[in-house]
Image: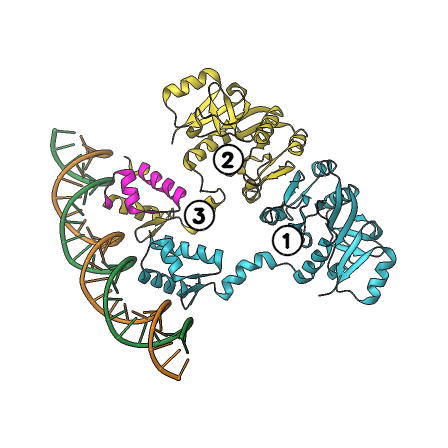
Chain colours: A yellow, B cyan, C green, D orange
Amino acid sequence: MLTTERHQTILNLLQDKQTITLQDIIDKTNASESTIRRDLSTLENNGELARIHGGATLTERKRKEYSITEKSAKNIQEKRAIAKHAASFVSDGDCIFLDAGTTTLQLIPFLKEKDVVVVTNGLTHLDALIENDIQTYLTGGLIKSKTSALIGPQAIQSLKNYRFDKCFLGVNGYHILYGYTTPDPDEAHVKYTASTMAKKSYVLADHAKYNQVSFAKIYDLSDAALITGNLQKNEIQHLAERTDVTEVST
Amino acid sequence: MLTTERHQTILNLLQDKQTITLQDIIDKTNASESTIRRDLSTLENNGELARIHGGATLTERKRKEYSITEKSAKNIQEKRAIAKHAASFVSDGDCIFLDAGTTTLQLIPFLKEKDVVVVTNGLTHLDALIENDIQTYLTGGLIKSKTSALIGPQAIQSLKNYRFDKCFLGVNGYHILYGYTTPDPDEAHVKYTASTMAKKSYVLADHAKYNQVSFAKIYDLSDAALITGNLQKNEIQHLAERTDVTEVST
DNA sequence: TTAATTTTGATTGTTTATGATTGATTTTTG
DNA sequence: CAAAAATCAATCATAAACAATCAAAATTAA
């Protein structure tokens, strides 16, 4: 394993877990204690992290950078990589719809430099959007308190007032036969409607959603481009037969 | 568990519960009594907390830092009294519009027992509404980041989908001649529209708004019932000639 | 290929963190 | 108010983490 790779691994671990123990890093990298100590020392000098007795922690500054996006979620690294790739499809001046959900949340920091206008139904996105100084419109609707998403006929209707260049959706499952699905029919309806108002739709989903099926169908695989991560070659091939799919590895 | 992690855990517990016992911390962290004592000692020296017999508590300074976010507004006592009185006009099962702003925010706790449906354009209200388990609809629209209010044509349009039993507005000034005013014409428009969709409108304004004039007029004094506080007799009389006014004293 | 340089992992003695124990202090209880 | 209980600070031995050093391995340059 290359030194820089190891450094990156350490930083990634930190972003996920806030603090890590030396032993953790040793296990993940299969490097010796001495090496990791040296790594930590180097990274500390570069201001990337702060060493503490027994391991390392994010510096105050770095912590703030990442606190924008929540870190409780699973597969956060993969989600961030997916989001980063999705962001590469966004052009300057685009009007985009950003669905509620943790994966789409990761997209926000990457939009900062793009001068976009965002419409969203995700209340949890607001802090990050405001913090990144992005012009934001909220759909109306009923607040579903469990997911902090706006749903219902009012959400649908207000969506119809917009036209999007791109639409980025999260889902709970994607399946070769059953398409994109999510547990709540109301949310599915919002996603579907947003898609119909967009020139191009992207679904962001980490590998845990592969061949998962949830209650409410949004639409077929082919109705949106899929951006996902860490799949096997044959899995990607199956998907590629059905839809436009991009896969990122972490 | 790393030392700094433990420290963070302790501080988090404190923020949640104000005071904690040593035993509590021991249970949460699986560290020994000695260790926790040392932790508390360290944190006390850093000014993060104050030790008390049997545990720890937030320092006066830190407590203020946290409560300041809620109570930073001026005339909070008066606003709460005004809000409480306004709540007495709310009936069980009412559908009400709650304008953005600090005064209307105070209304929320009093709505808990009333089984109401709330529509609001104030993003700062959401936490309180959800916490009080109130069914909430959000208008759509552009997020005005300074006040976290939803404004613009989309907000206006989504308001027109509702009919309210009552409508509670905040303003920046009320004046016998110039009526109710607020700095932002867009916000004024939202307030006005909400009013037109309501059977009855109330304006909530503390005494600092008396005879103040701001840029954008919402409507005349007589177009809404005024609930205010701590005015002088003759001031109330002048107002009473123009509109339905209630005054609460604190 | 060899020599120089860098990176690595093991070893050393040193420092720091931890948990158990003790007796002192404070709080509670009768 | 005094006895009992709980909490506390101080001490100590142990264990963990540490920086420093050095030789082996890997990489690069000549």
- Direction from residue A75 to residue B226 in the image, left or right: right
Q: Tell me, yes or no, whether the highlighted magenta stretch contains residue B87.
A: no
- Quarter of the picture containing the C terminus of chain A is top left
Q: Position of residue B100 (x, y in %)?
A: 68, 48
User: On what subunit does the disc labeled 1 rest?
Assistant: B
Identify residue for label 3. A63
Total numbered labels placed on residues in the image: 3
Position above or below: A175 against A87: above
Position above or below: A187 against B94: above
Cβ atoms under marks 2 and 1 closer than 8 Å = no
Q: Position of residue D8 (x, y in %)?
A: 35, 69
Q: Amino acid at mark 3?
A: Arg
Q: Position of residue A170 (x, y in %)?
A: 51, 31
User: On what subunit does the disc labeled 3 rest?
Assistant: A
Q: Residue at x 45, y 35 (%)?
A: A80
Q: Residues under labels 3 and 2: Cα distance? A: 18 Å
Identify residue for label 2. A107
Q: Earlier in the sequence, mark 3 or mark 2?
A: 3
Q: Residues within 10 Å of mark 2 (few under 14, many from 20)?
A: many
Identify residue for label 1. B109
- Direction from residue D22 to residue A224 in the image, left or right: right
Q: Which mark is residue B120?
A: none
Q: Amino acid at mark 1?
A: Pro
